């Protein structure tokens, strides 16, 4: 399609940017905050922990002023469950409520729409100690937490996201730091946890509609097109297998309230099927999302399984296709370049992903993450020339516009990340932000904020409603 003939971005398009609480806030044990599984986790050698992160907890006013200067229409952030309920449930921590009240009010005073992720990887450790998502009581704790968020913030927050990347927590929990190391036979247990998260999500969506009739709520998995390595029929089946297990399992459950049949037969074959109690399927059906939020970084390409253990070429990284004996085998795509961290760069795959989700669910779509992790260099005079990031985002925005022209109801685009933050397992050196934070892995320096070249570029994009990229 000819880009010059494509439709414009809608007038009220949510040009935004994203972060998550534990990766940006710091203040890990301040003002009554409880410990999360992330606080208790191990960090790969040479990478920072999350104790200070970008110190956003103390500098949110300065940061929001910069977001406003950049012209953001929306800011997607997560609430740390452990600031609201230090033990996951029980007593509310008023200081946590106060912090997010202030943050939301500050955003609104700058006309920035808050988009709130209710849970972004940081499960309260007190719940983990009682079995985490393996324990059905965690469903109640999550719903109780959701109720508190709707009660305190529902008068001002119009967009809610239930759970960030539930699919990555199931498939790559060890890499992102959410997998409980005590679980001996993780795969089977993880699908039980997955079932419980799906129930919690459905209940929260229903509750949101009851408590905040003007708000909208949706899931936020990581969804990507899966390409077959060739036109060989077995490769096509492998791609369909992986797509069902990685993508559609999560969205079919959220939207239709049922398990995807291919994913279910996969779980049966492997012995991973969850125990489903009476009434569970009704609960799943009772939660209806208003939109689908999703994170997109790259596509995956897969070939037929070789049916031997060499299929298990896991790299422990959430965006690099692994494999599974008898199911599929991840291969690298010869047509795509890679980032400095080995993630394939595929803007056209972004369009294809948007089209696929739209065709399958026919709901409004909101992109809640997309971006380039790179080793940025702070040059003399406080300059960061991140042209590679501009190039990456520009190409994705152009493809988003083509997808809109294809008929996709895209309501917003929130790249990762608004400001530099600590990556899930590759430290602060893997930067994504429009704003540079002056610190290294272990030297916190002065944490000062520096506008990167991409900051000025994104400001122009927003100002021109996507006409100028
Ligand atoms: C997503 C997460 O998986 O990708 C974010 O929702 C994460 O929390 C982002 O930071 C980029 O991944 P990484 O591993 O480079 O931080």
Image (cartoon, rainbow, N blue to C red):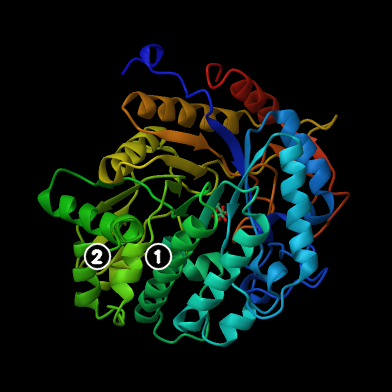
Give the residue pinned by disc 1.
Answer: 314
Q: Which of marks 1 and 2 is nearer the N terminus?
A: 2
Q: Is residue 315 visible?
A: no
Give the residue pinned by disc 2.
Answer: 263
Q: Indicate the quadrant containing the N terminus: top left, top right, bottom left or bottom right.
A: top left
Q: Indicate the quadrant containing the C terminus: top left, top right, bottom left or bottom right.
A: top right
- Considering depth in this image, is 141 or 295 the residue closer to the camera? 141
Numbered disc 1: secondary structure: loop
Is 22 left, or right, of 210 in this rendering? Answer: right
- Considering depth in this image, is 64 or 114 the residue closer to the camera? 114
Give neighbour class at mark 1: few <14, some 14-19, many 20+ (Cα, 10 Å): some
The residue at 71%/79% (across/down) is 91
Q: Can residue 314 be seen in this view?
A: yes
Is 360 left, or right, of 98 in this rendering? Answer: left
Question: Percent from the top left, x then y, of residue 131?
Answer: 51, 85
Question: Percent from the top left, x then y, of residue 49?
Answer: 71, 65
The numbered mark at residue 32 is none
The residue at 61%/25% (across/down) is 462
Numbered disc 2: secondary structure: helix
């Amino acid at each position: 399609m000819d880009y010059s003939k494509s439709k414009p971005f809608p007038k009220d398009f949510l040009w935004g940017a994203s972060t998550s609480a534990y990766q940006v806030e710091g203040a890990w044990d301040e003002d009554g905050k409880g410990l999360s599984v992330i606080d208790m986790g191990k960090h790969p050698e040479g990478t920072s922990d999350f104790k200070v992160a970008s110190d956003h907890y103390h500098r949110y006013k300065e940061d929001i002023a910069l977001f406003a200067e950049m012209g953001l229409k929306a800011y997607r952030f997560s609430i740390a469950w452990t600031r609201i309920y230090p033990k996951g449930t029980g007593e509310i921590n008023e200081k946590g409520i106060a912090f997010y009240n202030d943050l939301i009010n500050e955003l609104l005073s700058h006309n920035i729409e808050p988009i709130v992720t209710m849970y972004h990887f940081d499960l309260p450790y007190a719940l983990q100690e009682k079995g985490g998502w393996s324990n059905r009581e965690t469903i109640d704790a999550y719903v109780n937490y959701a109720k508190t968020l709707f009660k305190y913030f529902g008068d001002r927050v119009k967009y809610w996201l239930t759970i960030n990347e539930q699919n990555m927590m199931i498939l790559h929990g060890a890499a992102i730091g959410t997998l409980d190391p005590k679980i001996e036979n993780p795969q089977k247990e993880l699908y039980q946890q997955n079932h419980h998260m799906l129930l919690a999500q459905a209940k929260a969506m229903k509750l949101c509609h009851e408590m905040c009739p003007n708000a909208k709520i949706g899931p936020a998995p990581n969804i990507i097109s899966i390409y077959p390595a060739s036109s060989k029929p077995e490769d096509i089946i492998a791609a369909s297998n992986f797509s069902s297990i990685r993508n559609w399992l999560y969205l079919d459950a959220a939207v239709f309230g049922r398990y995807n049949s291919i994913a279910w037969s996969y779980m049966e074959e492997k012995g991973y099927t969850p125990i489903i109690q009476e009434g569970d399927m009704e609960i799943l059906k009772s939660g209806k999302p208003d939109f689908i939020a999703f994170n997109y970084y790259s596509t995956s390409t897969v070939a037929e399984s070789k049916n031997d253990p060499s299929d298990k070429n896991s790299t422990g990284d959430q965006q690099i296709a692994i494999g599974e004996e008898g199911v599929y085998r991840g291969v690298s795509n010869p047509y795509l370049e890679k980032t400095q961290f080995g993630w394939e760069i595929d803007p056209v795959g972004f369009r294809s992903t948007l089209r696929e989700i739209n065709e399958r669910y026919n709901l409004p779509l909101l992109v809640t993450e997309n971006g380039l992790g790179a080793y940025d260099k702070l040059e003399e005079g406080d300059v960061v020339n991140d042209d590679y990031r501009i190039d990456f985002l520009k190409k994705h925005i152009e493809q988003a516009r083509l997808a809109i022209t294809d008929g996709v109801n895209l309501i917003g685009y929130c790249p990762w990340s608004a400001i530099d933050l600590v990556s899930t397992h590759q430290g602060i050196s893997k930067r994504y932000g429009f704003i540079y934070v002056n610190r290294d892995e272990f030297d916190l320096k002065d944490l000062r904020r520096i506008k990167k070249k991409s900051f000025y570029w994104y400001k122009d994009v927003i100002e021109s409603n996507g006409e100028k990229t």
